[in-house]
Amino acid sequence: MVVDGIDPRTGKGFAIEIADGRIAAIRPAENTSPRYLSAGLIDLQVNGYRGFDLNNGEVTANILLSLCEEMLGVGVTTWLPTIITASKISILQALADIARIRAGHRLIAEMVPGIHVEGPSISDKDGPRGAHPLAHVRPPSIAEFDRWQQASGNLVSMVTLAPEHEGSVDYIRALTARGVHVALGHTAATPEEIHAAAAAGAVLSTHLGNGAAAMLPRHPNFIWAQLADDRLTASFIADGWHLPADTFKAMLRAKGPDRAILVSDMVALAGMPAGIYDQPVGGRVEVSAEGRIGVAGTPYLAGASLPLSANVAIASQMAGLPLADTLLLATANPGRFVGGRGLLEVGARADLIRFEWSEGERELSIRETWVHGEKASCA
């Protein structure tokens, strides 16, 4: 099979030959499709989308399959279902459900290489805790993590925690030794605790600049510490609401193009019609006509609403970056955390998207998607 299109970096046509689910050759081409061709997007943080919720009781086959189909429609070929802070039994049940369903569906198995557990060892303080339930915040436990892996068949590949908890350094070392990526987030840690966590093996900052207190010390704080620590890659929500353009642009420059990634962090209300919704987490929530999700009657955000295809386009505008550079933040860079996916090179997985986009548009228009060399979606 040969797939062709326009290279976002050069603006010239090229063709990709696919064999056995992988890229067999890449060559210049003429008279190609006028649409852009790129590696498929990779989203390391998805809580739900269009009413399908991974954190509200049982995870069913319909929820996972529907989310995979929705992800394909927005150009995401690899994603990590994200389970947030909950009771011990609730987390175990969600992990077991995902593992069982994934084992019986090839598309899910191809698109979902692991699971991201965001919590439960996050800050117990209002502000950095975000919408996570206080009642279920608890210190890190290696024994509990091992139960997660037993329930999921070792699918938990990323864990977000706040490193100020007692025992965090030993926990980070233990997870790192097990091949799990440890991320820092929803934290009120000191700079010293941030650097100690990175020294122990933490590799990522989860949605840096969010999941934080509204007021912080001007100079010594955990945001500066994470920006300065080259051992940490930072993920950002680039929807225009979670981070102002100047903040995002400065943070991106601080981390550098190789240590920055985009995540959607979408919740179940993402993509839903405008209106007021009563939610088990967050209470009374309003979805605006523009898609912003906030606590009704307040200025506070209640989740992220835009898919990664929109984050890529908006990030390009906010940071003044070429499309090709922004695409790396949603392909090759997050791909390092899922086994090296997201590359356009001979031998790489043939996860591809063909799309349209013009400067100023706030979302990539995904037209075709290939997962492991097979066409999976066509709009």
Image (tube, helix red, strand yellow):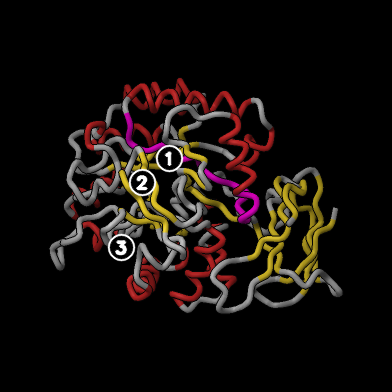
For the residue carrying disc 3, how many other residues have a C-alpha within 10 Å: few (<14), some (14-19), or many (20+)? many
Q: Nearer the viewer, residue 169 or 64?
A: 64
Residue drawn at x 50%, y 31% is: 155
Q: Range of the magenta residues?
A: 71-86
> Percent position (x, y) of residue 27?
80, 66
Q: Amino acid at mark 1?
A: Met
> Percent position (x, y) of residue 279?
37, 42
> Percent position (x, y) of residue 203?
38, 49
For the residue carrying disc 1, how many other residues have a C-alpha within 10 Å: few (<14), some (14-19), or many (20+)? many
Residue drawn at x 61%, y 40% is: 66
| Residue 76 visible in rendering | yes
Tags 2 and 1 touching, CB below 8 Å: yes
- Which residue lies under the disc numbered 1? 158
Q: Earlier in the sequence, mark 2 or mark 1?
A: 1
- Seen in the image, is 356 located left or right of residue 228? right
Please tell me in which quadrant of the rendered image residue 158 appears.
top left
Residue furthest front in the image:
275
- Which residue lies under the disc numbered 2? 183
Q: Earlier in the sequence, mark 2 or mark 3?
A: 2
In the image, residue 261 above or below residue 372: below
Q: Amino acid at mark 2?
A: Ala
Q: Is residue 337 magenta?
A: no
- Seen in the image, is 335 located left or right of residue 277? right
Q: Amino acid at mark 3?
A: Leu
Q: CA distance from mark 3 to mark 1?
A: 20 Å
Q: Secondary structure under badge 3?
A: helix
Q: Earlier in the sequence, mark 3 or mark 1?
A: 1
Q: Is residue 80 magenta?
A: yes
Q: Nearer the viewer, residue 354 or 179?
A: 354
Report the number of discs: 3
- Which residue lies under the disc numbered 3? 227
- Seen in the image, is 147 located left or right of residue 331? left
